[in-house]
Amino acid sequence: MKNNKSNISSKSSMGKYRRRGFTACCILILCLCCFTSTAFATSGLIDDDQLRLENLKVGDITEHGIVTAIDENGYFFKIDESEAVVTPMSTFNGSLTGLFDSETTLNDSAFYFGGQAVSRRTVMKMTHNGVRSYCRTGLRFVMNLQKNIQEAMIMAALNKKSVDDINVKGQRVLVRCDFNVPLIDGKITDENRIVAALPTIKKLIADGGKVILCSHLGKPKGEPKPELSLAPVAVRLAELLGQDVKFAADPEVVGENAKAAVEAMKDGDVVLLENTRYRAEETKNGEAFSKELASLCDVFVNDAFGTAHRAHCSNVGVTEYVDTAVVGYLMQKEIDFLGNAVENPERPFVAILGGAKVSSKISVINNLLDKVDTLIIGGGMSYTFTKAQGGSVGASLLEEDYLQYALDMIKKAEEKGVKLLLPVDTIVADEFSNDANTKVVSRDAIPDGWMGLDIGPETAKIFAEAVKSAKTVVWNGPMGCFEMPKFAEGTKVVAEALANTEAVTIIGGGDSAAAVNQLGFGDKMTHISTGGGASLEFLEGKELPGVAAANDK
């Protein structure tokens, strides 16, 4: 099992402090109330993923506890009475000396305390002396909250062990790959994900590991569906590697075939397990299946960034039962490019967001406005911004619930000094079809019954010009319905601008990746992410469970 000595130690200590800690927490709450002069409210539970800091108030009950103080920048921290701990919800640059006893419990992301990166779930066990010290310092602790938690989480992700940090000679190595490739009549129609996994696999073979590969394919929903078998992947993988790949055809994934194949392995051999989602427990991160996977290996390597934002058995659960869990080359590349782009970009830093809905990119917009020099918004989501500013959007895609949010983001951009570029014209159609009648209109004057399906030519020029001077560009989401040729021009112009720039260009997977590849610009981009959902959550600043589960350096 993974070494969790600090975890065990801290859990034991928790019990010791529970009674006096509860008292301490009560004292601390009273102290904070005195300093804030704000009464605790008893509002309903707030989902932390949907928190709007500007609407947050002392006394709100969040998913992780009660909000006990808010600084001038909107950062907050809370007290968890049930565990008698104080957990800061943002980064802290001050000193903790003499305030609290600190122990690391779970190693799942990080904050900065006094310039030192520590676990997100590092808890501050309260002592009576600590409370008295806190009372003397008052709200200095809170008022020194300086930076967003997201920065620390991303920086922690950049500090993971990789396949270059381990010796796998003679070891059984379970590698989580992303072999979720499109199949038509059992034939692979796009093998890019298989090719992307080859560097890690070849490295482990060359180092003398016994390489056991696993992946999901499609959504069999816990049933062994033959059309979603990984058997075709095994065939193509063998061709690409130039050696035999043993396919373990077990409907239960870890069955007799798999166990026998692993038992017979020699150094450098390769075995591919059946679709992990044949097991219903996979997506639920079930303990039994996690243990079964772990029983096959000595070392675990996660090279599937596309599923890193999900906590499943094959990328997170298995790490609880192995000592060594690292990332592969593909995962490391994703972390490095996305992490460095967001946290340490060469400037000017331009982000381009498109796609259908504002609601899918709420946190991305908010997070990037704290980091970029220019933010470009196109695609279907732009019409919500247009409507919020009083424009007419006809039958265009519109999210009425996010009109105020759009105005808030426009205001935030102004306050941050970020150049926010929105469409000035749009291509509209009288129906959602490539055969529709079209015309170009001002973005705020779309006629009734017509819908915007692409940015207009003037907008495309403005967006392309903004990219020219950039040193770092991150793009997530097309500018229009690029799947229909009539409405692909805006996306094409932006893609071409990125292809011709000297900037580091990072495409955030999903539709953006599909667009640049279909339009013939894929090989001109610095990096195209293999994970649409994962890259989006990374840009939001969220912790990716599949990354967090790997061993720290």
Image (tube, rainbow, N blue to C red):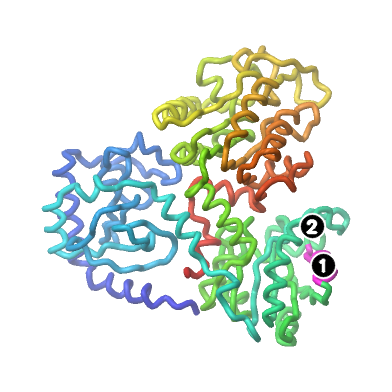
Q: Residue at x 19, y 47 (%)?
A: 139
Of 291 and 199, nearer the camera is 199
* Structural crowding at the residue carrying mark 1, measured as other residues with C-alpha within 10 Å and reported as few (<14), some (14–19) or many (≥20): few
In the image, residue 479 above or below residue 116: above
In the picture, measured across the screen, residue 55 lies left or right of residue 140, that is right
Residue 230 appears at what percent x and percent y? 78, 65
For the record, the magenta segment spans 229-241
- Which residue is depicted at the point 61% across and 46% down? 504
Identify which amino acid the numbered label 1 is placed on: Leu
Q: Is residue 48 something one can see in this rendering?
A: yes
Lower position in the chain sequence, tag 1 or tag 2 = 2
Residue positioned 74% across, 15% down in the render: 439
Residue 451 versus residue 474 in the image, above or below: above
In this orientation, which residue lies closer to the viewer: 19 or 78?
A: 78
Q: Can residue 253 be seen here?
A: no
Q: Would you say residue 234 sits in the magenta stretch?
A: yes
In the image, what residue type sits under mark 2?
Glu
* Left or right position of 267 against 151: right
Residue 191, disc: 2
Q: Which residue is mark 1?
A: 240
Q: Which numbered marker is on residue 38?
A: none
Contact check, label 1 and label 2, Cβ < 8 Å: yes
Magenta segment main secondary structure: helix
Q: Secondary structure at mark 1?
A: helix
Q: CA distance from mark 1 to mark 2?
A: 10 Å
Residue 549, given in percent of the width and then of the height, sits at 51, 66
- Residue 147 placement (x, y as % from top left): 36, 47
